[in-house]
Image (cartoon, grey):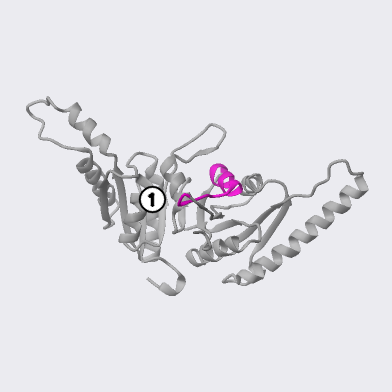
Amino acid sequence: MSESKGWPRSILLASDLDARSDRALDRALQLARAWDARLVVANVVDANAVEAHAMLVRDPPDWYRGSDPVHAAEKQLRDDAAARGVDVTLRVEQGGRVAERLLEVAREEGCGLVVTGVARLEPLGRLVLGSTVDQLARRSPLPVLVVRRRTHGPYRRMAVASDWSAASAHAFRTAAALFPDAAVSVLHGYEAPLAGLADAARDQLRAAARSRAEAEGRAFIAACEPPGGASAVSLVAERGDPSLLLRLYAAQFPVDLAVVASRGRSAMADVLLGSVAQRLLETSPVDMLVVRDPGAR
């Protein structure tokens, strides 16, 4: 593996061992192979589940030789890994707050990326994160890759949602280092207050807002110094909500990864995503890489 390309030595897959985790497992395996990285698969078993299992089998059949959720989780993880011909480090933990325990494992194992899946999808496409995924996205100092789609190969085109901030620039550079061969688009949704204006004035303000957004976008891209040069990055600046812009753009172009910066702010040791990033994560039609603002405390 080449550290010069910014690839992590180890990847943490946070798995809850159900069918929803299969897509995240496939993506984690693809990345581990591509980066020659070690894959650490971690599952945190709720202490209540262990107690409930013990209560359930307190009078088992004679042929039952005993088991518990911890051993069952470990066996399933080993079977999943062996079936794909990949050696992994397995960490089955018990008790504690799940997201915090997973991040402790990531630190202990020297991981540079957290991969996880979604809880479920609602009929209209909204992503229900589940408490663990939501907390990982909010609190992780490492980039968090939330996998939504099936894996059909490496990421080929990514869309970086940006508000021209330093946090967005850091997310851009992080994603470009992880996936240097992916084509990049920068998406920016801006507002142009137009209520109550005559048509001529409204058109003039719209043109001025677009011109300003495009100029700021070109300066942002140049400052990020993308690997292929600023001219290789597409800029999409449109009026409207960034989450809607991403959905429309991904429906028209072959985007398979979206990137967003988490909005760091100190609040009882929690790091909040920010409303725009939260909407993007919940409604993204593609996999989402969440990169924490390095200035977050």
Q: Is residue 207 left or right of residue 73?
A: right
Q: Which residues are magenta?
A: 268-283
| Residue carrying label 1 | 26
**Residue 280 magenta-highlighted:** yes
- Report how many numbered discs are placed on residues in the image: 1
Q: Position of residue 282 (x, y in %)?
A: 54, 42
Q: Find the residue positioned furthest to the bottom.
A: 4
Residue 125 occupies quadrant: top right
In the image, what residue occupies the spot 10% across and 25% down?
A: 61
The quadrant in which the N terminus is found is: bottom left
Q: Position of residue 297 (x, y in %)?
A: 49, 59
Above or below residue 53? Residue 191 is below
Q: Position of residue 230 (x, y in %)?
A: 65, 70
Q: Nearer the viewer, residue 6 or 152?
A: 6
Q: Find the residue positioned furthest to the left.
A: 62
Q: Position of residue 129 (x, y in %)?
A: 47, 41
In the image, what residue occupies the spot 92% across and 44% down?
A: 198
Q: Is residue 111 left or right of residue 194?
A: left
Q: Is residue 33 left or right of residue 293?
A: left
In the image, what residue occupies the spot 41% across and 55% down?
A: 114
Above or below residue 59? Residue 243 is below
